[in-house]
Image (cartoon, rainbow, N blue to C red):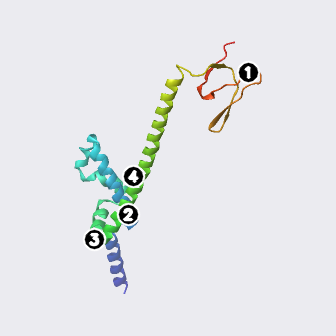
Amino acid sequence: MKRILYIALLMLVAASCGPRRISRADMEGIMYDILIQDQQIKFNPTLKPQADTSLVYEGIFESYGYDTDDFLSSLEYYLEEPSRLEKVMQNVGKRLDGEIDEVSALLDAENWRKKMMAIYQLQRDTTLPHPRGRVVDSLPLRFLGDTMHLEVPQDSLPVPHPDSLLFVRDSL
């Protein structure tokens, strides 16, 4: 009886020494990282000589706690039933689409900011050298949030067009 138990224990240990199967969540992460790595290699010529070896993905596998044998064994498992790999790749695609949308939103915001700065620069360049109004000296300004409020002292003349003022610093 002890021999059978001992042999069964040895068989269990021997079977556990083989490659492990990667979970679906980890496989999604690994495939995502592989796609990102491939794109970095594609667009960076200095990385291409290093990419000629199959060890280029070893760091990705290690970051998830696996090795190349585990990945290849798991890939065979997922390829036995293509719907499994299809689910993995669909989730990777959704993750990439989400990041593309996020980057697009950031680029749109940056482009909008550049356009607004160009408009501001154009307006500043066209109004300051040739002011349409008169020079106002030492009027107190108070800023309220995103607006500016101009306070005109009682002894000053009313200003007809406050958007065309040129503010000059007091030299006295």
Residue under label 3, please give it.
82
Q: Height in image: 131 above or below 50?
A: above
Question: Is residue 113 at all visible to an observer of this figure?
Answer: yes
Residue type at numbered disc 4: Ile
- Between the residue at mark 1 and the residue at mark 3, the CA separation in whole angstroms equals 82 Å
What is the secondary structure assignment of the residue under circle 3?
helix
Describe the element under mark 1 as helix, strand or loop: loop
Q: Position of residue 6 (x, y in %)?
A: 35, 80
Q: Which mark is residue 136?
A: none
Q: Which label's residue is closer to the chain start, 2 or 3? A: 3
Query: Mark 2 or mark 1, which is nearer the start of the sequence?
Result: 2
Alpha carbon separation for disc pair 4 and 3: 26 Å
Position of 112 compared to 68: left or right? right
Q: Earlier in the sequence, mark 1 or mark 3?
A: 3
Mark 1: amino acid: Ser
Local crowd size for mark 4, using a 10 Å CA cut-off: few (<14), some (14–19), many (≥20): few
**Residue highlighted by disc 2:** 91
Query: In percent of the image, x 63 and y 36: which residue is there?
Result: 147
Q: Residue 118 appears at what percent x and percent y?
A: 46, 32
User: In which quadrant of the rendered view does residue 30 lie?
Assistant: bottom left
Q: Nearer the viewer, residue 85 or 168?
A: 168
Check disc 4 and report the residue beneath it. Answer: 100
Q: CA distance from mark 1 to mark 2?
A: 68 Å
Q: CA distance from mark 2 to mark 3?
A: 14 Å
Q: Report the side of 35 relative to 129 (left or right).
A: left
Q: Under tag 2, what secondary structure? A: helix
Label 1 sits on residue? 156
